[in-house]
Image (tube, rainbow, N blue to C red):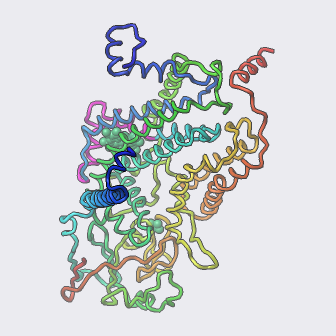
């Protein structure tokens, strides 16, 4: 039995039987956190808040939504027009999806810039990539639920990707659909899974946090926090900082919800799904655009005029590969220095890489013709070269700047510099 | 494991017997668990009612030469084109070596004047244009897919663009002079 430090008799009684208070105290209050975290470190907890908001709004929507292809579109319109605050719940959920990806992408690029994926945080990083994959699946299936034209045709194009798999491709697609085209069986299973996956995300997030608290936070300097002066307790310092971040985040999020609720949406999705007419220009949600670009620009892969992998399959492999390669990042980058602040060459390539992802997003939003195809191919080549060639080479040949001896010495020197 | 107890048994023999039992029960258990996953997986495959909707009958008598109609089969559009003489010759006078998915036109129809193909682009499943007058039909006079620009000839064969294969010819038969059954 543990002896609770709490003075309150009821709290103490509970704590000695179920140590929730000891746990919270250790992980959220005393938890030693590097003293120099900047606002880029707020995005993890913001993502957690978004997950909670998505779940709450989602459960309320589920009470009104009808998962049947004849009623789904109308039930969403009913939510928008007749259900009390239904418009608010739906706009929170719709824009929440976009916000979730913005926040998580920032969180992820933060990790790359400051080398947070390096030892001992490899598993923490890998769990993050798993969360990203689950989020993508969840958002993809959620987007099908309102059963508009983009829902239907986006789902058609994406599920058809699997038909590129040799031999069993078509059977897999019919299995995914539960039929010979996207229809009611597809809608009902996507709904069931769209409800389930966020709870899987909660589980993986929990593991992500266990891994985090095992190895503790990285920090903008990328040097380990060793001495007690390098850290401060999580509460009140980072609770306060995080809550300020939440405030700013909600200003942006609610700004969209109230003033531009369809900013991220596609007007075509307000047309009911029609299996017999394809809209002229199918685009996925913005957060999938870079991957969609990779999918479409890849040509047949030929070796001496002999087609090794045909374009469709190659596109699919590279699209999934573009995310899976993230799992290997901790081993591709062998540099011992984490933070880009002390890695002049890495830092430059980081910004080029970020620009490359934005370029691919822009290509994905445009029809795959003419110069967009060329740009997309260059962008795709750079994307993979960044991970597979540039990062390992930079790690070997770059000469990093001298590292500060500790977090605290660097922070105090900066302060002195400001004063003089 | 406790050394004494192990020695007390008929030594080596017993140990390999135990290993064998562990291995075989483990194997049977694993295979059993894996097999029992099948009903769960198969429940997601097309159900009997979906399968039972899988034939469609079409009356062709109102379709004039040069016209096209679209019918629904298994939830997908099927393009039926009453081809003109010119379209047929165009489809037949093609050097097969030019084709990505080489199939002679003769193998893609039962009667040359009727071309029946599933109206789903083999690339990523969009519905090609070209059924209605005024819609683009591409350079080969067949169909044009607006999604990523695949072009099909008057036999529904892929001629340009990302689609890897021709438009699929569904199984069908003539049930009398003027109607067909698809599926
Ligand atoms: C990881 C968190 C989640 C993400 C990223 C997500 C994403 C989405 C997206 C993109 C849509 C389509 C919005 C639209 O265009 O209308 C949607 C719809 C929907 N979601 Fe979620 N969702 C999440 C969690 C949940 C949860 C936990 C539930 C229920 C328990 C839920 C229930 C629904 C329902 C009923 C709809 C259809 C109504 C509508 O279209 O607005 N979602 N979701
Ligand atoms: S779906 Fe027709 S060209 Fe891609």
In the foreground, A381 or A327: A327
| Picture coordinates of residue B17, whole percent (x, y) | 32, 59
Check the picture and name the quadrant holding the C terminus of chain A. Answer: top right
Q: Residue at x 45, y 88 (%)?
A: B90
Q: Is residue A265 above or below residue A216?
A: below
Is residue A88 found inside the magenta-colored segment of the image?
A: yes
Q: Residue at x 19, y 85 (%)?
A: B175
Check the picture and name the quadrant holding the N terminus of chain A. Answer: top left
Residue A190 appears in the picture as rendered: yes
Is residue A230 found inside the magenta-colored segment of the image?
A: no
Q: Which residues are magenta?
A: A69-97
**Looking at the rendering, which quadrant does residue B48 occupy?**
bottom left
Residue A177 appears in the picture as rendered: no
Relative horizontal placement of residue B41, taking residue B89 as reference (left or right):
left
**Looking at the rendering, which quadrant does residue A65 occupy?**
top left
Q: Main secondary structure of the magenta part?
A: helix
In the foreground, A129 or B141: A129
| Picture coordinates of residue A66, whole percent (x, y) | 24, 45
Q: Residue at x 18, y 64 (%)?
A: B49
The image shows a total of numbered marks equal to: 0
| Picture coordinates of residue B8, whole percent (x, y) | 33, 49
| Picture coordinates of residue A160, whole percent (x, y) | 40, 63
Q: Is residue A112 above or below residue A301?
A: above
């Amino acid at each position: 039995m543990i002896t609770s430090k709490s003075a309150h008799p009821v709290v103490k009684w509970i704590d000695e039987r179920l140590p929730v208070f000891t746990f919270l105290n250790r992980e959220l209050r005393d938890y030693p956190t590097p003293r120099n975290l900047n606002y880029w470190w707020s995005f993890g907890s913001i993502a957690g808040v978004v997950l909670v908001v998505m779940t709450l709004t989602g459960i309320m929507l589920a009470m009104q939504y009808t998962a049947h292809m004849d009623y789904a579109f109308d039930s969403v319109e009913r939510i928008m027009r007749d259900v009390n605050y239904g418009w608010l719940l739906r706009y929170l959920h719709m824009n929440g999806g976009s916000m979730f990806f913005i926040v998580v992408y920032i969180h992820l690029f933060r990790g790359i810039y400051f080398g947070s994926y390096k030892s001992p945080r490899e598993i923490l990083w890998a769990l993050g990539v798993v969360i990203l994959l689950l989020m993508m699946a969840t958002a993809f299936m959620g987007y099908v639920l309102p059963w508009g034209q983009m829902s239907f045709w986006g789902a058609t194009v994406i599920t058809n990707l699997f038909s590129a798999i040799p031999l069993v491709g078509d059977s897999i697609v019919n299995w995914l659909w539960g039929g010979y085209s996207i229809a009611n069986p597809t809608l009902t299973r996507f709904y069931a899974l769209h409800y389930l996956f966020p709870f899987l995300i909660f589980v993986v997030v929990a593991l992500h946090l266990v891994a985090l608290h095992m190895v503790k936070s990285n920090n903008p300097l990328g040097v380990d926090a060793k001495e007690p002066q390098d850290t401060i307790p999580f509460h009140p310092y980072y609770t306060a900082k995080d809550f300020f971040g939440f405030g700013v985040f909600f200003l942006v999020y609610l700004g969209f919800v109230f003033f531009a609720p369809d900013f991220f949406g596609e007007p075509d999705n307000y047309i009911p799904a029609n299996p017999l007419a394809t809209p002229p220009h199918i685009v996925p949600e913005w957060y999938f655009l870079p991957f969609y670009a990779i999918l479409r620009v890849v040509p047949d892969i030929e070796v001496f005029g002999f087609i090794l992998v045909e374009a469709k399959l190659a596109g699919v492999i590279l699209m999934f590969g573009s995310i899976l390669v993230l799992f290997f990042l901790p081993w591709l980058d062998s540099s011992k220095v984490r933070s880009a602040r002390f890695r002049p060459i890495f830092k430059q390539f980081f910004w080029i890489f970020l620009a490359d992802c934005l370029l691919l997003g822009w290509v994905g939003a445009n029809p795959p013709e003419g110069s967009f195809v060329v740009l997309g191919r260059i962008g795709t080549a750079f994307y993979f070269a960044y991970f597979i060639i540039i990062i390992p080479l930079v790690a070997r040949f770059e000469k990093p700047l001298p590292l500060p001896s500790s977090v605290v010495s660097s922070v105090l020197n900066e302060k002195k510099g400001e004063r003089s | 494991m406790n050394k004494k107890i192990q020695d007390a048994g008929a030594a080596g023999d017993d140990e390999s017997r135990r290993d064998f039992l562990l291995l075989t029960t483990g194997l049977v258990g694993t295979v059993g668990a894996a097999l029992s996953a099948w009903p769960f997986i198969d429940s997601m495959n097309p159900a009997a009612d979906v399968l039972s909707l899988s034939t469609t009958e079409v009356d062709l008598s109102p379709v004039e030469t040069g016209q096209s109609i679209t019918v629904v089969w298994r939830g997908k559009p099927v393009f039926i084109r009453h081809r003109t003489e010119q379209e047929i010759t165009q489809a037949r006078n093609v050097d097969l070596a030019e084709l990505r998915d080489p199939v002679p036109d003769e193998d893609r129809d039962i009667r040359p004047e009727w071309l029946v193909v599933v109206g789903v682009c083999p690339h990523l499943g969009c519905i090609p244009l070209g059924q209605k007058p005024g819609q683009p039909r591409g350079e080969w006079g067949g169909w044009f897919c607006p999604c990523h620009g695949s072009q099909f000839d008057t036999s529904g064969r892929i001629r340009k663009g990302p689609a890897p294969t021709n438009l699929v010819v569904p199984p069908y038969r003539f049930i009398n002079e003027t109607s067909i059954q698809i599926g």
